[in-house]
Image (spheres, helix red, strand yellow):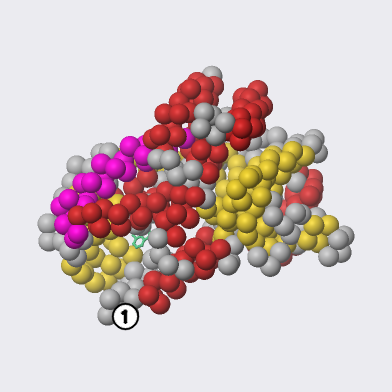
């Protein structure tokens, strides 16, 4: 675990899958909801000033990632005594020995210690050390790839008291720019607006800007609505903030024998395009809990059953994350039309017509593999278009 840095935090949207997992722990969903903003839809601001509203029937819970992590930690430490759960911060796992069943943890440059385990759960993110061990020593077949997009976190105020300008408090605000750059800003409690500027990693529109004035000017010119909300302090911070890349992970299994398990991004990191990484990670925990109830503490059954149930869904999620949203203009129009028509027909004939792919991901808890099979035609179409 590392320090809770604000450099790379961003808003996470949670829907039915993630929230269902939270609900399994008494009081957790309520604690998270109390520090979240519920968004009723998205406003898309086009390049030429055109504004399009995409309403959502089911509001999306949005919460800052660091805030979410601290609520989970609080719940954990308040529910279990220190004898039951010990939490160590700033311990970096540097080595695993699966035969001796030990892990080595580094405290700082000079100090590290080795401790043994019965069960090792690798929830250590997309650059998982535990996965690396399994890949190098236990024949785990896995691959990892960077998505072409890179991002920087951006923090603004939702209102400008001088101009009295303000953005709607319960909508996600999406902006696009010529060279594939875009911004996604999400209202947070206290009139904050947190989000990201996303761009092709080879074409960083902020590269070459060296002063806070230049950064502010860039936003005023390219994202005028946000430019008005950007202070010079934030422009200065943005200059210093690192560019982050997103790594995706594809594994053929998530366990080794009866003693090592991978969950969350360590097992199946995906592109954030449809906002499912955290939802699916929480769902992993729910499923692990259900398997523990089914098999008791028999890890020899629980771990393979987890892989069996989860790998196909994780692979389906990757397809959905890569190909739900098209990049071609004509397909974007088709996507929006299909979504609206299916919404309408689903409202009239709920048993006959299922919602379109994005609504299926967001508003249902159908397994991702089922969502993919219901949406395969569309996914194939977007995939073909991305090859041309
Ligand atoms: C810009 C962006 C927007 C996103 N938006 C959404 C969204 O709207 N909805 C959604 O569902 N998902 C979203 N995601 C994805 C989501 O953030 C991840 O899927 C989720 O955080 C995965 O959780 P995790 O616990 O598996 O991994 P992480 O959140 O990466 O946590 C891993 C933890 O392990 C620690 N760690 C790493 N290496 C070691 C080591 N060697 N030793 C010890 N500890 C270690 C890290 O410090 C960290 O605390 C988004 C991602 C990005 C980049």
Q: Give the residue displayed 19% in from the left and 55% down from the top.
A: 295
Residue 102 in view here = no
Image quadrant, ligand 1 = bottom left
Position of residue 375 in the picture relative to residue 177 (left or right) = left
Question: x, y (%) of residue 369?
Answer: 39, 35
Is 6 located above or below residue 367 in the figure? Answer: below
Is 87 located above or below residue 172 in the figure? Answer: below
Q: Give the residue displayed 76% in from the left and 54% down from the top.
A: 167
Q: Which residues are magenta?
A: 296-320
Main secondary-structure element of the magenta-colored stretch? helix
Quarter of the rendering occupied by the N terminus: bottom left
Q: Give the residue displayed 41% in from the left and 46% down from the top.
A: 269
Q: Give the residue displayed 51% in from the left and 25% down from the top.
A: 378
Quarter of the rendering occupied by the C terminus: top right
Mark 1, residue position: 82
Question: x, y (%) of residue 4?
Answer: 49, 67
Position of residue 246 in the picture relative to residue 60 (left or right) = left
């Amino acid at each position: 675990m590392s320090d809770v840095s604000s450099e790379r935090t961003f808003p996470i949207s949670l829907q039915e899958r993630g929230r269902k997992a939270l609900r399994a722990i008494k009081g957790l969903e309520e604690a998270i909801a109390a520090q979240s903003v519920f968004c009723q839809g998205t406003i898309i601001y086009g390049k030429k000033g055109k504004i399009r509203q995409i309403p959502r029937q089911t509001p999306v819970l949005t919460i800052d990632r660091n805030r979410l992590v601290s609520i989970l930690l609080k719940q954990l430490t308040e529910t279990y005594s220190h004898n039951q759960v010990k939490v160590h911060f700033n311990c970096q796992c540097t080595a695993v020995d699966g035969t001796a069943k030990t892990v080595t943890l580094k405290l700082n440059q000079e100090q590290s210690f080795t401790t043994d385990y019965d069960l090792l759960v690798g929830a250590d993110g997309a650059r998982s050390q535990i996965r690396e061990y399994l890949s190098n020593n236990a024949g785990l077949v896995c691959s990892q790839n960077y998505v072409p997009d890179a991002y920087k976190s951006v923090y603004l105020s939702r209102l400008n008291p001088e101009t009295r300008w303000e953005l709607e408090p319960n909508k996600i605000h999406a902006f696009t720019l010529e060279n594939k750059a875009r911004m996604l800003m999400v209202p947070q409690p206290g009139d904050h607006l947190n989000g990201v500027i996303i761009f092709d990693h080879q074409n960083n529109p902020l590269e070459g800007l060296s002063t806070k004035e230049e950064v502010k000017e860039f936003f005023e010119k390219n994202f005028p609505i946000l430019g008005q909300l950007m202070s010079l302090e934030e422009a200065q911070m943005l200059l210093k903030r690192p560019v982050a890349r997103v790594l995706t992970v594809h594994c053929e299994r998530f366990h080794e024998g009866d003693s090592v398990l991978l969950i969350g991004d360590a097992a199946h990191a995906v592109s954030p395009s449809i906002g499912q990484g955290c939802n699916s990670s929480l769902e992993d925990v729910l499923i692990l809990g259900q398997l523990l109830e089914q098999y008791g503490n028999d890890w020899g059954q629980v771990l393979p059953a987890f892989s069996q149930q989860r790998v196909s869904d994780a692979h389906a999620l990757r397809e959905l994350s890569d190909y739900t949203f098209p990049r071609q203009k004509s397909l974007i129009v088709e996507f929006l039309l299909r979504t609206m028509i299916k919404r309408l027909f689903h409202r009239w004939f709920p048993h006959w017509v299922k919602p379109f792919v994005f609504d299926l991901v967001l508003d249902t808890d159908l397994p991702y593999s089922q969502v993919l099979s219901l949406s395969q035609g569309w996914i194939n179409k977007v995939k073909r278009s991305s090859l041309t």
